[in-house]
């Protein structure tokens, strides 16, 4: 799933900063989103306690995206986007007055890395993060699958590892202070939580609805592990029947085997059943 934001309804979600104390640099911001229409609207804002916008990412009505950072007089047009196309957008900025570097790719496509505007650090750290909320440009009209803010400048190569899913996002975070949010809840009444455990959880919500999954993108965190299982087969007991003679033919009717598996995973153990058949049993009987 993803979360759909409808501009006309004023949909938005806000989360706390958790352990984030970024004032603009060093910072990396990553989004996986798609537009419903070519509409001007705010996708993400990092805002201080006094309402100063640390960083902002917006869609434009002419089919271009816009980025603003601390110290900029206005938003800068950065690249084109199309509707109904899942895409990654990321930007990185170092400490102080430094160039904002942009990174973008359609889901499953190749990356482009380019320098944007120059920005400065904020006078205050971020205190709230908004998704889909707007001020002058209004609200987002589209779907949001995942977002991440890290207090470190990721390299171009690290950015390019993020296509597969959240496990890769988790890897680049490592021990760096960060916030990580997935918008794959099955109900809008399930809060959006900071998956780093740092406490940047949902504060407020207005509207939104459940959207579809970005194809091929995994929300699974961490690496899958193998599970072990053991099967206990009871002793086989059968009744023998035959006629005494110099050559005896003996038949044995064996019961069906039943075994239960004990599996080291949180799934119900399956029931295994089978039948053993003994063929061509021969031998010699000696009278005593």
Image (cartoon, grey):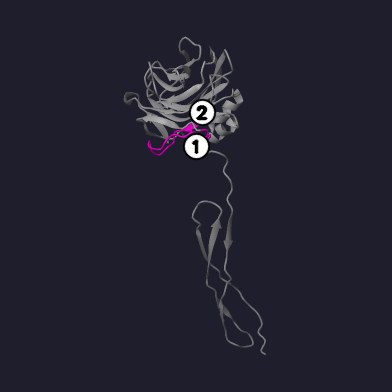
Q: Could you tell me residue 15's position as x and y percent? A: 45, 29
Q: Secondary structure at mark 1?
A: loop
Judging depth in this view, the residue of 76 and 248 nearest the camera is: 76
Q: Residue furthest left?
A: 8
Segment tinted magenta in the rendering: 180-198
**As drawn, is 58 to the left or to the right of 156?**
left
Q: Residue at x 43, y 29 (%)?
A: 144
Q: Secondary structure at mark 2?
A: strand
Instruction: Answer whether residue 192 is magenta in the image.
Output: yes
Q: Main secondary structure of the magenta part?
A: loop
Q: Earlier in the sequence, mark 2 or mark 1?
A: 2
The quarter holding residue 187 reads top left
Q: CA distance from mark 2 to mark 1?
A: 13 Å
Instruction: Answer whether residue 214 is magenta in the image.
Output: no
Q: Residue at x 58, y 20 (%)?
A: 26
Q: Where's the N terminus, which quadrant?
A: top left
Q: Where's the C terminus, which quadrant?
A: bottom right
**Does any portion of residue 85 appear in the rendered image?**
no
Q: Residue at x 46, y 32 (%)?
A: 201
Dot 2 corresponds to which residue? 148
Judging depth in this view, the residue of 63 and 55 nearest the camera is: 55
- Tell me if residue 33 comes above or below residue 271 in the rendering: above
Q: Could you tell me residue 116's position as x and y percent? A: 53, 14
The quarter holding residue 135 reads top left
Q: How many C-alpha atoms fall within 10 Å of the one at disc 1: few (<14), some, or many (≥20)?
A: some
**Does any portion of residue 134 appear in the rendered image?**
yes
Dot 1 corresponds to which residue? 219
Q: Could you tell me residue 147's position as x and y percent? A: 49, 28
Q: How many C-alpha atoms fall within 10 Å of the one at disc 2: few (<14), some, or many (≥20)?
A: many
Q: Residue furthest bottom?
A: 288
Q: Could you tell me residue 100's position as x and y percent? A: 55, 16
């Amino acid at each position: 799933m993803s979360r759909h934001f409808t501009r006309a309804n004023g949909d938005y979600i806000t989360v706390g900063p958790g352990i984030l104390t970024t004032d603009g640099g060093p910072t990396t911001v990553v989004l996986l989103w798609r537009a419903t229409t070519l509409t001007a609207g705010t996708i993400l804002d990092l805002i201080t306690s006094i309402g100063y916008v640390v960083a902002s990412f917006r869609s434009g009505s002419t089919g271009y995206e816009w980025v603003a950072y601390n110290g900029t007089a206005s938003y800068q047009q950065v690249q084109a986007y199309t509707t109904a196309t899942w895409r990654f957008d990321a930007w990185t900025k170092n400490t102080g007055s430094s160039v904002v570097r942009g990174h973008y790719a359609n889901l499953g496509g190749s990356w482009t890395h380019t320098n944007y505007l120059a920005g400065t650090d904020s006078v205050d750290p971020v205190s709230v993060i908004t998704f889909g909320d707007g001020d002058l440009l209004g609200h987002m009209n589209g779907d949001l699958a995942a977002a991440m803010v890290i207090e470190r400048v990721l390299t171009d190569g690290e950015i390019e590892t993020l296509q597969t899913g959240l496990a890769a996002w988790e890897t680049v975070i490592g021990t760096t202070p960060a916030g990580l949010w997935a918008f794959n809840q099955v109900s809008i009444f399930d809060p959006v939580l900071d998956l780093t455990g740092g406490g940047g959880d949902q504060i407020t919500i207005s509207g939104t609805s459940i959207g579809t999954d970005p194809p091929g993108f995994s929300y699974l965190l961490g690496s899958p592990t193998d599970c072990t299982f053991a099967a206990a087969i009871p002793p086989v007991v059968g009744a023998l029947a035959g006629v005494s003679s110099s050559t005896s033919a003996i038949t044995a009717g064996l019961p069906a085997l039943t075994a239960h598996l004990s599996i080291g995973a949180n799934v119900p153990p399956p029931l295994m059943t089978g039948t053993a058949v003994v063929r061509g049993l021969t031998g010699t009987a000696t009278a005593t």
